[in-house]
Image: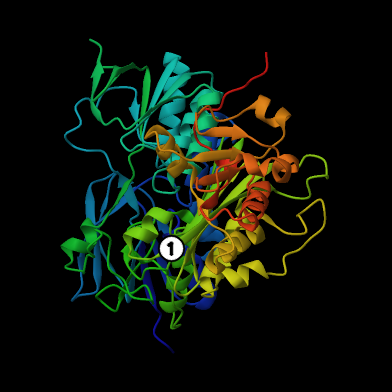
């Protein structure tokens, strides 16, 4: 009779249970044990902000699988309230402590899985972090603590520190609960790890319009409380914000103590180092989820990516390999999507900022358009930004922001990146088309074609941010708005350089423009602006370009002329 494979898994949230379930399907006879220090397993932690908002009605909705399910259906032993404290690599044993009885025991293993996750990155030097009413949001008990605070204290003013995914989602949750909400972010834009500034500006505008007080470019110095030890104020470098409840959403740190104490290799990012098989430096110990570092598939560099989607992929590969398989994990693209009230934002690959920092010579496009045929009822605007390597024409990344569907476009770009595709590949993708679902040319097609025009020399673009810098610096150029007079009256850029010349009048009035001037054309989405550029070049204007994304992508204030 073959020896029974003894599999022990530390961590019961995402990668751990997925590893266990996959291992059971691959090996019906293995002895599988999950060690979890909390009181639940398989929490749907990505849904916590929506649970706080009340959109997910009960905590049971977020408990994907319970210990009883694992035992009764899959014959997997789950030890809740049990902490793994040490690994005896030579003896192939895991030392654990029962947190209820404080008794220690040792569990033998043939294969060990470390899926210890990540913990909120709260600076130890932050004064006031222990005050009542100050929370992080990682586990279900955190969310229940927030809900209890709302029930007991009826907070009216919420401050979220950090404008990343969890911060933005929870700010919306607090707003849905009727609170006055402020977001404090040390960097100058919202979602700074996801979006370039001109794309982030669309989410910032939405947050502001929904009543969120954005405090960008401000680092939190301390939290102050009242005599009862309850938080009452958030102090930044520039302001003091009254608060009844505070969420610290400053990112995450991988939990690697168990691995480090066992002398397993820790990567430069601070995550556990694993190979493509998800093996640690000990071939009998595997690791996955938020505690490990990943390889970025575009740059080849190691990165931390705490996402449930990645953790589940890790878990499946680990479960395959600890039962004799040889599956591999190719790495991540940094793909993410987030709902910001009524605006959606997604990204994959490298942002322009990241691509330039990595040494790429890039060309970009900003292409606004409707999510599906504009004449079909309900079509909403989205904007696609694409980043391409000039030398190889390979797509490096993309961002999609707008009120319409953005995840599908991100997934198209993920697939392109995964296959090493070029901007030409994207331009000719045979995407599904029917008016209720798509345009005859999707916005990603348009974004790709803008870049192809730039690479061929047929088009020259300039970003809205650069145009604004030129305006602020008082540079001499013509910002030629070729929209209609009605569109101009609705909203236009207030600047001495800006003038209106509708596209249908351009040829008749072209002689009024100085041929030696630099001309930047613009419209609503850049389509007419590009046409105007072509007309001007045909008329002998040599210094002409169009503003990428035009008014739709303009992240600054616009003026209305209507009375």
Q: Residue at x 62, y 63 (%)?
A: 449
Q: Position of residue 531 (x, y in %)?
A: 67, 52
Q: In which quarter of the image is residue 506?
A: top right
Give 398 or 467, whichever is nearer the viewer.
Answer: 467
How many marks are shown on the rendered structure? 1
For the residue carrying disc 1, how many other residues have a C-alpha within 10 Å: few (<14), some (14-19), or many (20+)?
Answer: some
Q: Which residue is drawn at 33% across and 51% down?
A: 118
Q: Is residue 41 above or below residue 389?
A: above
Q: Quadrant of the N terminus?
A: bottom left
| Residue 236 pos. (x, y %) | 26, 24
In this picture, is 471 found above or below 534? above
Between 534 and 212, the residue placed more toward the observer is 534
Q: Please provide percent x and percent y for residue 140.
A: 44, 39
- Colouring chosen for the image of the structure: rainbow
- Which residue in the protein does label 1 denote? 362
Q: Can residue 364 be seen in this view?
A: yes
**Picture residue at 26% right of the left edge, 38% below the top:** 122
Q: Residue at x 53, y 38 (%)?
A: 554
Residue located farthest toward the bottom when viewing the structure as drawn? 1
């Amino acid at each position: 009779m073959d020896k029974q494979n003894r599999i022990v898994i530390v961590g019961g949230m995402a990668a751990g249970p997925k590893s266990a379930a996959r291992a059971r399907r691959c090996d019906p006879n293995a002895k599988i044990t999950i060690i979890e220090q909390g009181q639940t397993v398989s929490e749907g932690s990505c849904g916590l902000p929506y649970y706080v908002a009340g959109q997910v009605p009960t905590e049971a909705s977020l408990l994907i699988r319970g210990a009883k399910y694992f035992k009764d259906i899959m014959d997997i032993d789950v030890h809740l309230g049990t902490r793994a404290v040490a690994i005896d690599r030579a003896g192939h044993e895991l030392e654990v402590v029962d947190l209820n009885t404080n008794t220690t025991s040792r569990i033998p293993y043939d294969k060990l899985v470390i899926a210890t996750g990540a913990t909120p990155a709260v600076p130890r030097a932050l004064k006031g972090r222990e005050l009542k009413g100050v929370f992080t949001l990682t586990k279900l008990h955190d969310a229940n603590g927030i809900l209890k605070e709302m029930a007991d204290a009826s907070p009216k003013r919420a401050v979220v520190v950090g404008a990343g995914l969890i911060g933005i989602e929870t700010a919306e949750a607090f707003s849905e609960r009727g609170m006055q909400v402020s977001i404090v972010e040390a960097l100058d834009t919202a979602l700074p790890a996801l979006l370039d500034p001109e794309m982030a500006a669309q989410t910032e505008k939405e947050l502001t319009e929904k009543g969120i007080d954005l405090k960008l470019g401000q680092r939190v110095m301390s939290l102050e409380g009242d005599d009862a030890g309850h938080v009452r104020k958030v102090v930044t470098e520039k302001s003091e914000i009254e608060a009844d409840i505070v969420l610290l959403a400053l990112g995450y740190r991988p939990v690697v103590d168990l691995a480090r104490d066992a002398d397993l290799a820790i990567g430069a990012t601070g995550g556990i180092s694993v190979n493509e098989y998800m093996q640690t430096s000990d071939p009998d110990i595997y690791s996955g989820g938020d505690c490990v570092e990943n390889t970025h598939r575009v740059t080849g560099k190691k990165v931390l990516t705490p996402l449930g989607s990645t953790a589940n992929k890790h878990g499946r590969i680990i479960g395959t390999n600890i039962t004799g398989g040889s599956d591999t994990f190719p790495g991540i693209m940094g793909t993410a999507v987030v709902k910001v009230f009524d605006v959606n934002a997604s990204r994959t690959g490298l942002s322009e900022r990241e691509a330039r920092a990595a040494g790429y010579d890039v060309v970009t496009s900003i292409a606004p358009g409707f999510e599906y045929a504009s004449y079909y009822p309900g079509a909403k605007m989205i904007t696609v930004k694409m980043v391409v390597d000039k030398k190889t024409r390979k797509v490096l990344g993309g961002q999609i922001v707008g009120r319409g569907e953005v995840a599908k476009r991100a997934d198209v770009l993920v697939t392109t990146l995964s296959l090493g595709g070029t901007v030409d590949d994207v331009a000719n993708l045979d995407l599904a088309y029917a008016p209720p679902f798509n345009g005859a040319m999707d916005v990603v097609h348009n974004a790709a074609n803008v870049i192809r025009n730039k690479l061929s020399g047929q088009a020259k673009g300039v970003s809205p941010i650069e145009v604004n810098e030129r305006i602020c610096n008082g540079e001499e150029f013509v910002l030629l708005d070729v929209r209609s007079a009605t569109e101009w009256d609705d909203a236009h850029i207030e600047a001495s350089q800006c003038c209106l010349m509708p596209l249908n009048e351009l040829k008749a009035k072209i002689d009024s423009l100085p041929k030696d001037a630099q001309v930047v054309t613009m419209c609503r989405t850049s389509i007419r602006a590009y046409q105007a550029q072509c007309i001007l070049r045909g008329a002998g204007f040599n210094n002409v370009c169009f503003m990428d994304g035009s008014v739709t992508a303009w992240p600054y204030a616009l003026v209305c002329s209507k009375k």
